[in-house]
Image (tube, rainbow, N blue to C red):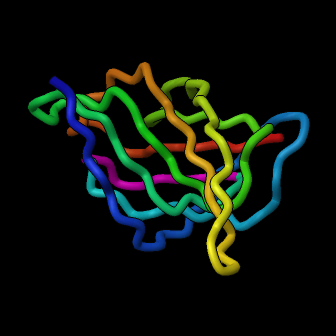
C-alpha cells in the first residue's frame, strides 16, 4: 500500500547551480517541506507544491510530484535527494490558469528509495 503525503507551499527561496545546454534564469522558488529533510532547491522554475509518495509506514520516499507555476512542457525536469544522481521526471500537460492566473504544470518523479529520516536535501532542476 502506498500513500501520498502532501506538503503545503510556504515560500522558502533557494537556488542551486545547474549545468546544461540551456537553463532558465527565472525565479528559483521551492516550498518548505517537512518530509524528513532539511532543505530543498529548485533551479529554473517556480515550484508551488511538492507531494511525496511514501511507503505505508512513511519510512521511505519512492516518488515526488512537483507542481510548477507556468508552462514547463517541452522542458526537462530532474530531481534527487542529497548527493545521489538526479532522476528524470515526467512532465505533464500545462493547465491554463483562470482569471489571469499563470497556470501550472506538474512533473512526476519516481524510482526513489530514499529513507525519509536520512534525506537532508531535495533538488529539482528544470532545463530547456
Which residue extends farthest bottom?
A: 99
Q: Percent from the top left, x then y, of residue 105?
A: 62, 50
In percent of width and height, residue 66 lies at 50, 47
Q: What residue is at 71 percent from the left and 67 percent from the top?
A: 27
- Give the x, y percent position of residue 57: 9, 32
Toward which corner of the image does residue 122 lie, by quadrant?
A: top left
Assess whether residue 38 is covered by the magenta stretch: yes
Q: Main secondary structure of the magenta part?
A: strand
Report the number of discs: 0
Query: Does the stretch in magenta take in 69?
Result: no
Relative to 82, is 104 on the left or the right?
right
Residue 19 lies left or right of residue 102; in this view the side is right
User: Which residue is painted at 62% across and 58% down in the image?
Assistant: 104
Judged from this view, the residue extending furthest toward the front is 99
Q: Quadrant of the C terminus?
A: top right
Magenta residue span:
36-43
Splitting the image into 4 quarters, where does residue 49 fall?
bottom left
Q: Nearer the viewer, residue 78 or 107?
A: 107
Above or below: residue 88 compared with residue 101: above
What quarter of the picture does the N terminus occupy? top left
Residue at image location 62% in from the left, 73% down from the top: 98
Above or below, 104 against 111 in this view is: below
Amino acid at each position: 500500500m502506498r500513500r501520498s503525503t502532501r506538503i503545503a507551499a510556504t515560500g522558502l527561496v533557494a537556488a542551486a547551480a545547474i549545468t546544461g545546454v540551456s537553463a532558465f534564469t527565472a525565479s528559483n522558488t521551492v516550498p518548505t517541506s517537512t518530509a524528513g529533510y532539511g532543505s530543498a532547491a529548485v533551479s529554473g522554475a517556480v515550484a508551488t507544491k511538492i507531494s511525496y509518495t511514501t511507503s505505508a509506514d512513511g519510512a521511505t520516499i519512492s516518488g515526488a510530484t512537483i507542481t510548477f507555476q507556468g508552462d514547463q512542457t517541452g522542458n526537462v525536469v530532474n530531481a534527487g535527494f542529497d548527493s545521489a544522481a538526479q532522476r528524470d521526471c515526467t512532465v505533464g500537460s500545462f493547465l491554463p490558469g483562470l482569471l489571469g492566473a499563470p497556470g501550472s504544470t506538474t512533473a512526476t518523479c519516481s524510482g526513489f528509495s530514499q529513507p525519509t529520516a536520512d534525506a537532508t536535501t531535495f533538488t529539482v532542476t528544470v532545463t530547456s
